[in-house]
Image (cartoon, helix red, strand yellow):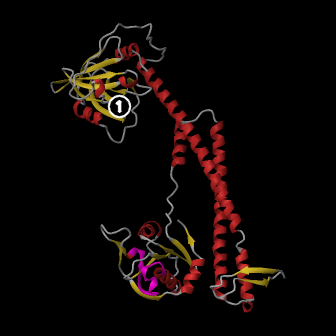
Amino acid sequence: MLNSNEIRLLLSELNLEGSFIQKVSEHDYHSFTFSMFSKEEKAFLLYFEIGTRTQHFCRTGIMRKKSDKAQRFTQYMRANITGSRITEVKQIDGERVFYFTLVKAGEIRRIYFRFFSGPGSNVIITDGDDIILEVLMRRPKRGEERGWAYNVEEAKSWDEERFPVRQWEGESFNSFIDHYYSNAVREEKTDAAYHQLEEQTRKEISALESQLRDVRERVRRSSSYESYKESADLLSSFSYMVSKGESSVILTDFSGSQVRISLDPSLSVSGNINAFYQKYKREERIYASAVEEQKNLESRLEEKKKFHEELTSRQEHDLRELTKNLRSSQTPASKTPIEAGLRFESFGFEILVGRNAKENDTLLRRNARSGDTWLHTRDYAGGYVIIRGRKDKSIPLDVLLDAGCLAIHYSKAKTQGKADLYYTKVKYLRRVKDGKLGLVVPTNEKNLYVTLDEERIKRLLLSKEEKN
């Protein structure tokens, strides 16, 4: 932080009287740059930073990054200070306060720069009678508000022993201060970026380890998927030994051992066989997906641990590299569909079912694609049913009937046991302006009359994967 004697030395080097403020550039809430011009110095930059740990001012050769949107104070300066000529530069004796007297179109203004510590720092613009026109930081309790009289600080004696100018080197004290605080800010940002990146990396490692534990457990649970196929094959081979209504059956497997197979007594023999094959296919997919995810997570975890090792072992870090890594680390993963409703498997096709208006809306907004097929009961409230499209595959009649039965099962038409439905591609649905949540109007729709088949529903329920 600058003391009064350092401010005096900075001002003495600048020779600002007679120069013009051509432009005001804001960098953030606390800092801005004046683009100056004088006959002697030509164009040069004057940087101000107020109210921070590193607050200072100096002539600079660096044009800092500009803020995206100018604050109120900057807008005022651009409208009223730009184009002004500095006729006087005056520091209050012994104080960390100085002001410029400005003239523009015959109108006199003063701009006070106060480099006090804490809430005392401020930039205040007044008229020629020291009535406040605008302030960088409004502080009514200190009397610093538009329309109020500014109480100019009283002069003090210069105390060079108590407030000495720091040791410096270079062509000028201004250039020294410019480099000194630029380096201090850079070091501070580097240190903050380093600690933030280190903390972020540790959190990511912990999250990856937790995900990996879950995936490994999923691999373990689904690794016995072959047993469902073996049960289905046994039932197919010895179907003549199984009667409908049995809850289990003991059969001799292909190795000669006896095994007990649990059955669903409400299903026929073929229904139980199909249910086991469906479980086998589902668990096989889950297993393959989990194994792939496990490999991916293990690779990412290894890379993240290696990066953390390199990060903690290096002594010096480039701010640009750290910031780049931090941005990369904080970039959210690509959005995955928010899953809602129920999932069913039907002859290799996935069927999605919403059970209420919110789930219907989520299915359409986040899960359904334009080429998917949408079904809904006519004249009855109910869930939306989506048949996920497959590339170069038309929807078989059985899949369409399965979807139709689900539409009836999850609607008010369930008690009737039958209903008219309409279906169309998702791309032909039109939302109702200001309508209820999820409400759509179908176009290019086709009609379908379906009688509810309980056997289909039982089979589909066995294949259901519900994800909240």
Q: Position of residue 166 (x, y in %)?
A: 47, 14
Amino acid type at circle 1 is Phe
Q: Is residue 420 magenta?
A: yes
Q: Is residue 196 magenta?
A: no
Quadrant of residue 382 in the image?
A: bottom left
Residue at position x 36%, y 14% in the image: 8
Horizontal side of residue 208 vs 131, given as left or right: right
Horizontal side of residue 322 vs 74, given as left or right: right
Q: Residue furthest left?
A: 106
Name the residue carrying label 1.
32
Quadrant of residue 318 in the image?
A: top right
Who is closer to the viewer here, 101 or 388?
388
Quadrant of residue 222 in the image?
A: bottom right
| Residue interval drawn in magenta | 409-427
Q: Position of residue 268 (x, y in %)?
A: 64, 88
Neighbour class for label 1 at 10 Å: few (<14), some, many (≥20)?
many
Who is closer to the viewer here, 392 or 31?
31
Who is closer to the viewer here, 164 or 398?
398
Q: Is residue 172 visible?
A: no
Q: Position of residue 234 (x, y in %)?
A: 74, 84
Residue at position x 38%, y 20% in the image: 116
Q: Quadrant of the N terminus?
A: top left
Where disc 1 sits, the SS reads strand
Horizontal side of residue 389 vs 308, given as left or right: left
Q: Residue furthest bottom?
A: 240
Residue at position x 27%, y 36% in the image: 75
